[in-house]
């Protein structure tokens, strides 16, 4: 029995060791984050490389150029540059591709790491990045920035753009308090969420006054957008300031000494300009702006302070956006409830309605009882003003909307398998209750919690598919880990079966030694006391023949 126990323990140790090794290898493979990528050439078949040409060649449609841009916007390239203008590519840049990309030059594997930028001894007149000690890039492989498009042309695709030179004239048009306080950012506490995502790959459309893309804190994270109010031009100009303040709370870049840090700093804001000043925008312009965001495949739409969702045209646009899988985030209503079944009522049902709170936790407005889904900081919030005005402090529900929209971007980046209603439900169920119970008539489900919204494991979501659709919005190989885990489990099961078979064989050899077995029910040979012998007494050559009729016997030999 001691030999049996020793053999069993040894076999068990082998199974555990082999299984651990297989699992460790699978985890290491998953950590490598396999993706599909393409290295930009100086030219292809005699033509300069463009995102549209690459998309047409490898994805089957030039219209999918925006997907490639969203996967790569802002990521450091081998030459130290970054993709911020979709019309400018450089030879040698490495572009992460969607998972269905097929064609010459497509590579599947870990994305090559970009080397640390080296110091450039001489400043290049054609590259502002020289001031950041980055080497000058090679000659552009495409034409320079495209001319502004009209609102009636093909809608923009949420592509990050270079800051417009026209941003300056708006400087100095906004006034207000500058007594900066960090309470709102501290209350939002996004650091826990950032261990998994910072919103990479997410496009957040801000429907308001535009966004001042000339601010250094927003560089590379504001697309050219659309100017609906003038019918042409870009949306990345802001003469009012509310849109810029919202954008800063979403994507302002964190860092040492940063006065404002966005909650989803790796996302991209698409400014939809529907007003130039404090005048309420025309409902048709707002509806058109929401439609542009839908066409650009935004994942989140944040509505500014002048947007009236109780206007039928605006409400219908909100409903349609939600029907396209977009999470629409707007201010919690303060007026009377709309008629049941109306477009306004349906808009409230599909929106994430956000209320603002001040530092003491009280609401900043008289929101309709029961009409608040969640709350976020909205009183005395520090953000950025347009060029020339610096850090601004303001109060308004639109600031709370921006915070909530940023959390939506984080969730959509971390959980791309969730549809819009599931994203909204996740944010609600992970919020910190502020009333006696949740939902509360004043605070809804409570204060949005960025960390819990991203990291919490919810039983209600177990029916959803895994993260196989991930980080195409971020280029991190989101389909790989679940597949590797499946392969690892399969291999471990096979190894365990083989090990179990070996254990059985080993035990049989220990229990039944390699001797000729005795009759059924006979005791084991043990130390040899029991054996097989014959009873022949003739002593002839054939022990089984003779007068004595010898027989074969199992037992103790006399």
Image (tube, grey):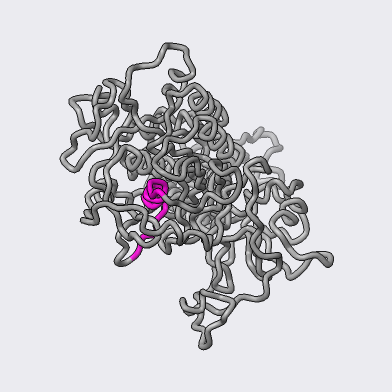
Position of 188 with respect to 240 (left or right) is left
Q: Is residue 558 visible?
A: no
Magenta stretch encompasses residue 246: yes
Q: Nearer the viewer, residue 275 or 248?
A: 275
Q: Position of residue 193 (x, y in %)?
A: 36, 48
Query: Which residue, as the protein is rendered here, is positioned at the far left?
Result: 360
The residue stretch that appears in magenta: 240-255
Q: Is residue 312 left or right of residue 186?
A: right
26 versus 521 height, above or below = below
Left or right for 499, reference 179: right
Comparing 490 with 514, the one in front is 490
Left or right: 327, with 370 as reference point: right
Q: Quadrant of residue 252?
A: bottom left
Identify the residue at horizontal 53%, vertical 35% (top origin). Answer: 285
Q: Report the magenta stretch's main SS.
A: helix
Image location (x, y in percent) of residue 116: 50, 75
Give the residue drawn at x 27%, y 26%. Answer: 367
């Amino acid at each position: 029995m001691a030999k049996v126990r020793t053999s069993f323990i040894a076999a068990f140790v082998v199974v555990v060791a082999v299984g651990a090794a297989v699992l460790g290898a699978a985890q290491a493979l998953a950590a490598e984050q396999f993706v599909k990528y393409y290295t930009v050439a100086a030219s292809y078949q005699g033509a300069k490389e463009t995102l549209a040409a690459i998309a047409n060649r490898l994805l089957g449609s030039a219209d999918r150029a925006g997907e490639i841009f969203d996967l790569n916007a802002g990521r450091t390239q081998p030459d130290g540059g970054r993709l911020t203008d979709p019309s400018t590519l450089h030879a040698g840049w490495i572009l992460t591709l969607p998972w269905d990309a097929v064609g010459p030059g497509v590579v599947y594997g870990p994305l090559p790491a970009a080397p640390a930028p080296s110091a450039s001894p001489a400043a290049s007149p054609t590259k502002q990045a020289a001031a950041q000690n980055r080497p000058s890039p090679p000659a552009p492989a495409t034409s320079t920035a495209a001319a502004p498009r009209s609102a009636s042309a093909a809608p923009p695709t949420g592509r990050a753009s270079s800051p417009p030179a026209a941003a300056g004239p708006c400087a100095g048009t906004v006034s207000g308090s500058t007594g900066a306080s960090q309470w709102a950012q501290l209350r939002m506490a996004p650091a826990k969420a950032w261990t998994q995502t910072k919103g990479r790959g997410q496009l957040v459309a801000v429907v308001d006054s535009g966004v001042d893309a000339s601010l250094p804190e927003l560089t590379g994270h504001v697309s050219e957008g659309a100017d609906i109010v003038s019918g042409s031009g870009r949306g990345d100009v802001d003469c009012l300031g509310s849109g810029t303040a919202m954008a800063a709370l979403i994507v302002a870049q964190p860092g040492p000494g940063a006065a404002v840090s966005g909650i989803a700093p790796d996302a991209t804001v698409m400014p939809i300009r529907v007003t130039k000043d404090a005048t309420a925008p025309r409902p048709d312009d707002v509806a058109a702006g929401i439609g542009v965001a839908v066409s650009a495949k935004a994942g989140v739409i944040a509505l500014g302070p002048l947007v009236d969702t109780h206007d039928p045209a605006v409400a219908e646009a909100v409903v349609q956006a939600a029907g396209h899988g977009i999470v629409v985030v707007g201010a919690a209503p303060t007026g009377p409830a709309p008629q049941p079944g109306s477009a306004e009522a349906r808009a409230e049902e599909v929106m994430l309605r956000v209320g603002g709170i001040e530092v003491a936790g009280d609401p900043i407005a008289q929101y309709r009882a029961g009409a608040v889904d969640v709350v976020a900081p909205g009183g005395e919030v520090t953000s950025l003003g347009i060029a020339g005005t610096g850090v601004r402090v303001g109060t308004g529900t639109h600031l709370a909307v921006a915070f909530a929209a940023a959390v939506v971007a984080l969730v959509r980046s971390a959980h791309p398998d969730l549809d819009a209603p599931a994203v909204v439900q996740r944010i609600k169920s992970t919020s910190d209750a502020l009333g006696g119970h949740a939902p509360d008539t004043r605070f809804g489900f409570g204060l949005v919690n960025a960390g819990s919204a991203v990291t919490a494991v919810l039983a209600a979501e177990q029916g959803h598919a895994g993260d196989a659709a991930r980080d195409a919005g971020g280029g991190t190989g989101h389909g790989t880990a679940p597949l590797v885990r499946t392969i690892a489990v399969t291999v471990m099961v096979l190894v365990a079966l083989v090990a179990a078979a070996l254990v059985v064989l080993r035990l049989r050899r220990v229990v039944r030694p390699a001797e000729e077995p005795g009759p059924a029910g006979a005791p084991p040979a043990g130390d040899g006391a029991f054996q097989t012998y014959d009873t022949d007494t003739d002593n002839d050559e054939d022990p089984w023949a003779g007068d004595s009729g010898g027989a074969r016997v199992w037992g103790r030999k006399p």
